[in-house]
Image (tube, rainbow, N blue to C red):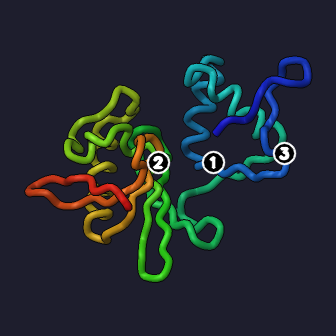
């Protein structure tokens, strides 16, 4: 999420002034505490992308237990960050999973035991990734990862003891 570009004398302002921004409360609290100690938190992204939204009164904090927008069911996926949530959507007997930062590269589907360097809680990241991949395979759910390149979305299939990625058509 990007709050926008500097304006008003170099101060960052929200890009979408009529929007409501949803933040998992636990994750926000974690990064806010870090930001209070070090303004450069997350290479400055907390300062330019989160602080302006909160200061503008446009932030709503989620506990991760309630459905969002009447259709998005949160599922906790801690590891990359505390309080991180993925979202499940269902319609007409089909399911999709917005996987958040559970994986940053498609290789992590075949090798779910590989973390990237950005996982704050490596053991929990492995557990969360394995759970998401297992659920996606069992439910034949379309995964919509945040960081994978083209084809962007697809299906997780069982392959022996592990998993394989099948691009969506």
Left-right relation of 4 to 97:
right
Residue 138 spot, x, y in % from top left = 26, 69
- Is the residue 135 above or below the residue 147 in the image? below
Give the numbered dot on residue 23.
1
Q: Looking at the image, which residue sits at the far left?
A: 160
Disc 1 packing (10 Å; few <14; some 14–19; many ≥20): many
Comparing 140 with 44, the one in front is 140
Mark positioned earlier in the residue sequence (1 or 2): 1
Which residue is at 40% across, 29% downward? 118
Give the numbered dot on residue 66.
none
Residue 115 spot, x, y in % from top left = 29, 34
- Is the residue 94 above or below the residue 51 in the image? below
Which residue is at 32% across, 63% downward? 136
Mark positioned earlier in the residue sequence (1 or 3): 3
Please tell me how many numbered marks the rendered image carries: 3
Q: Is mark 2 on a helix, strand or loop?
A: loop
Which residue is at 91% across, 24% downward? 8
Give the numbered dot on residue 100.
2
Q: Looking at the image, which residue sits at the far right?
A: 8
Q: Mark 3 points at which residue?
A: 17
Camera-side mark, 1 or 3: 3
Mark positioned earlier in the residue sequence (2 or 3): 3
């Amino acid at each position: 999420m990007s709050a926008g570009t500097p304006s008003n004398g170099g101060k960052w302002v929200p890009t979408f002034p009529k929007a409501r921004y949803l933040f998992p409360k636990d994750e926000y609290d974690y990064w806010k505490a870090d930001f209070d100690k070090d303004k450069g938190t997350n290479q400055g992204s907390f300062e330019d992308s989160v602080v302006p939204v909160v200061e503008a009164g446009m932030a709503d904090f989620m506990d991760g237990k309630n459905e969002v927008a009447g259709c998005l069911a949160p599922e906790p996926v801690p590891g990359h960050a505390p309080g991180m949530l993925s979202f499940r959507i269902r319609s007409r007997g089909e399911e999709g999973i917005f996987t958040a930062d559970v994986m940053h590269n498609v290789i992590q589907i075949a090798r779910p035991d590989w973390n990237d360097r950005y996982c704050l809680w490596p053991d929990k990241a492995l557990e969360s990734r394995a759970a998401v991949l297992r659920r996606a395979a069992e439910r034949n759910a379309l995964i919509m990862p945040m960081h994978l390149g083209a084809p962007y979305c697809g299906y997780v299939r069982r392959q022996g003891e592990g998993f394989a990625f099948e691009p969506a058509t």
